Amino acid sequence: MPIPYIDIQNLTKSFGAQVLFENISFSIAEGQRVGFVAKNGTGKSTLLSVLTGKEGYDSGKIICKRDLKIGYLEQSPQFDPEESVLDACFNHHGNEERVLRAKQILTQLKIKDLNQPMGQLSGGQQKRVALANVLITEPEFLIIDEPTNHLDLEMIEWLEGFLSRGNKTLLMVTHDRFFLDRVCNIIIELDDQQLYTYRGNYSYYLEKRQQRIDYARAEVERANNLYRTELEWMRRMPQARGHKARYREEAFYELEKVAKRRIEERQIRLKANKVYIGSKIFECRYVSKAFGDNVILKDFYYNFARFEKMGIVGSNGTGKSTFIKLLLGLEPLDSGKFDIGETIRFGYFSQEGLQFNEQQKVIDIVRDIADYINLGNGKQMSASQFLQYFLFTPEQQYNYVYKLSGGEKRKLYLCTVLMKNPNFLVLDEPTNDLDIQTLQVLEEYLQDFAGCVIVVSHDRYFTDKVVDHLLVFHGQGNIKDFPGNYTQYREWKSLNSVEEKEQKKDNDKRENVQKKPKRDDSRRRMTYKERLEFAQLEKDIAALEEEQHKIEEALCSGKLSVDELTEKSKRLPALKDEIDEKSMRWLELSEIES
């Protein structure tokens, strides 16, 4: 029986008249890795703060296992600017073993100067120190808010592996869908103040969520048909009604609630397919840029094609954002030139671009740019319709900016960039703090966008959906051009890495053969015992891989009990280790002649 770590019963939280969530209930047991999914502004970060005791709540109960050790990563952690990185991790209390562990994790997160004052670190670096702080303490239960923000792809893939290993228990808010898919075994969705639980990974959640929406849409359609009939009856009936009629009247009002339920699923795709752009886009003519010893570009040449959708990826500090600022003329070049076409109208979404008058209403922010956006063919969309397309409800559009959540403000900033109707979009980390539904809207918009796009993003799912080409920044001016999306690049890199290892292995063997004195005896053959072991290993590996396949299918089926789910979640990592160990031994024996 898995140990229940936390049990939430009928929890309600509101800010003034706005109800974030009402009477929600769920529990998390040992070994469960839960992803929490909801739209911006519905209280994801607030819920985590409530569960950790940093915020109060209106009603309900939160029951924790006695002496439960919780680790909490906030979305925007705060530190004493004077204390060092190492002190920030331990609050001045750390034995040698924990200090060594801290150094290992901080190195993975590319924080190298452990004596540097926290005040000298960027916001992203401080978030990484906070993440290290949580992981070092080895809590029983991890609560983490947007852990992949400010991490580059290499760090994200390391963190995926770290959280997936062993029997960790966690509750996580993230917009990174690859991360959700690979780390979580349960998805909880908060939608329209209702809670839905899906016992599987993100892919399983998507499938089952669509089934739920289809069913709800059909239910509303049936209710609407019946509602029209009952409405006609209500209008015909006199005021004095018998008991049977009163019962039917009460049933009518319940039916009315269902019929008027709003299923907020967009049925259209916004296709601004008449954006004019000339044949000449831009040409990087042997451009160079360095900050001291840190080389960003060195005699870099590239000719950008019409309608190209490029992704820029690479580790933090390799110059991705600087490249964009150079292109836009926000940073001076050391040498070379950007030759930009006369028809180009840039739309720039930056990491630092959130600057609004907080006392303005959302709709007025957008209308100050334009009342309408031209879609071509004589069609246009009003500012209000455009905001609604990006999931601002009519009510939210008349909210003041100061009432918006961080994610909603980022979404509003995105709308102000797009409302200017550019023909070349430059988006620097557009996915940070946006909810998954907004990301899906943005993906569709960019897929249909009839102009050019450059995206800098660590969100692999988003990049795969949007780009058809990559520039990979390796640092010190080393930039590689790859004709494909991020997953294709990873597959190519993995294959290339295997080939390089095999080539190195062959070279090492040749060198060893040349160094060794020649012997007359032939190569060693397998002993009888080794042949038996070799045959048995093949059977064992096949059986273990079959077991692994069945467990993964079962975990995604949604049919397991809590006990079965916990048992199989524990078995899977041990099974993978066993397969790796036996495969390694099989490889060793396969190199001996039989």
Image (tube, rainbow, N blue to C red):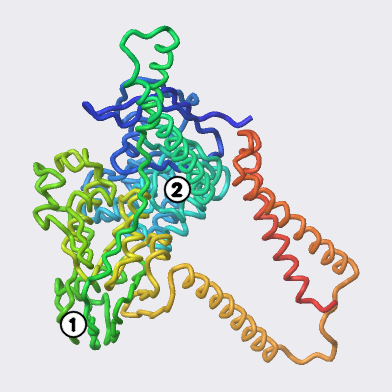
The circle drawn on residue 101 is: none
Per the image, the residue denoted by label 2 is 96
Residue at 25% of width from left, 51% of height from top? 411
Closer-to-camera residue (398/190): 398
Using a 10 Å C-alpha cutoff, classify the residue at mark 1 as few (fewer than 14 neighbours), some (14 to 19) or many (20 or more). Answer: some
Q: Nearer the viewer, residue 204 or 482?
A: 204
Find residue 145 and report its horizontal and vertical position in percent: 36, 44
- Vertical order, 581 against 309 (above or below): above
Find disc 1 in the rendering and name its residue.
341
Residue 536, compared with residue 482, is above or below; it is above
* SS state under label 2: helix
Q: Residue at x 16, y 79 (%)?
A: 343
| Residue 396 figure quarter | top left
- Residue 289 locus on image (x, y percent): 22, 79
Secondary structure found at label 1: loop
User: What residue lies at 9% left-to-right and 41% top-to-bottom?
Assistant: 359
Point out residue 17 in the picture as x, y percentages from the top left corner.
22, 26
Nearest to the eye among marks 2 and 1: give it: 1
Q: Examine the rendered structure and indicate whether residue 396 appears above or below residue 308.
A: above
Kind of residue at badge 2: Glu
Distance of mark 2 from mark 1, alpha carbons?
A: 59 Å
Return the disc, 2 or 1, that comes first in the chain's sequence: 2
* In front of the other: 394 or 65: 394
In which quadrant will I find the C terminus? bottom right
The answer to whether residue 138 of the structure is visible from this angle is: no
- Tell me the crowding category of disc 2: few under 14, some 14 to 19, or many 20 or more residues within 10 angstroms, Cα based: few
Q: Which sits in the foreground, 258 or 565?
A: 258
The N terminus: image quadrant: top right
